[in-house]
Amino acid sequence: MGCAGAQVDQVFAALGPGVRGLVYDYSPQPFSPDPARFVLPEVIEARGSAEQLVADWCGRALYRADPVQGQAARMLQPFAWSYHDGEPSRIAADLERPEVGEVRERLLSWGLGRGMTVPLHLPGRGFATLTAFVETEKGEAALARFALMAFGLQDRIGMAEGRGPLSPREAECLGHTAEGLSAKQIAHVLGRSESMVVKHLQAAAVKLGARNRSHAVALATRQGWIA
């Protein structure tokens, strides 16, 4: 994750006017609402006005009470949210919880009371989010564009981490997957057990930083592992 800072800089610059701040955070374990098991982000990169929240979110563990992170841990799709009264929001039902009060007060006082968040669930590599703090409510088109930026950011971070190369067998299994074969069919072609093929595919996905098998094929093709 050492390259995350430069990648976050690029995304923040690309977002342009109307975005007050940006935060990327990564934890090696998925977010848990249980304080006894809670893991603060291993990596947190904040830009713009969002830089001021890092000390409280990590140092005082307000990250634990942040309902945006709670929603992101339970979701796969990007979402918009707001702490402002009367605005439609994914976190509206959470705002009455006592532990959310300080989070809401601080974000509103900093002008960071609305935003967009993209959950990034990473097989074998934990959980990350990318959050943009915006001045005005954003529609579905803006959310979709931001989601593409978030997935692209995570792909670039993953590729820059220097993972080991795919083994010939892992690349071969992904190549057959790209042709539409199931793990069972690949096992038949290669004369191997289905469980071994699944292990090769899982190992390849981890090395590539892929979210699923289709994403692994796309990344492997882009990086030249398969034709």
Image: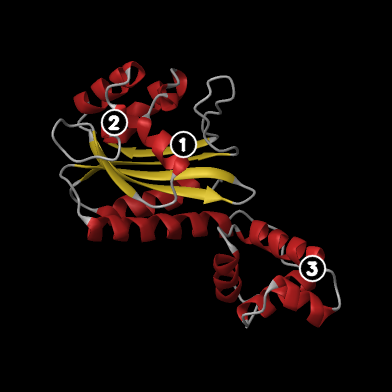
Name the secondary structure under disc 1: strand
- Counting from the top left corner in percent of width and height, residue 145 is at 30, 60
Task: Name the residue at 59% across, 72% down.
Answer: 217
**Above or below, comparing residue 219 to residue 144 in the picture:** below
Q: Which residue is mark 1?
A: 44
Task: Name the residue at 74% across, 73% down.
Answer: 184
Q: Which residue is mark 2?
A: 93
Which one is earlier in the sequence, the residue at label 1 or at label 2? 1
Q: Which residue is mark 3?
A: 194
- Please identify, in this view, whether the residue under mark 1 or under mark 2 is nearer the observer: 2
Tell me the amino acid under the disc marked 1.
Answer: Ile
Quarter of the C terminus within the rendering: bottom right
Which one is earlier in the sequence, the residue at label 3 or at label 2? 2
Name the secondary structure under disc 3: helix
* In this rendering, position of residue 35 left or right of residue 174: left
**Most foreground residue, 225 or 8:** 225
Tell me the amino acid under the disc marked 3.
Answer: Glu
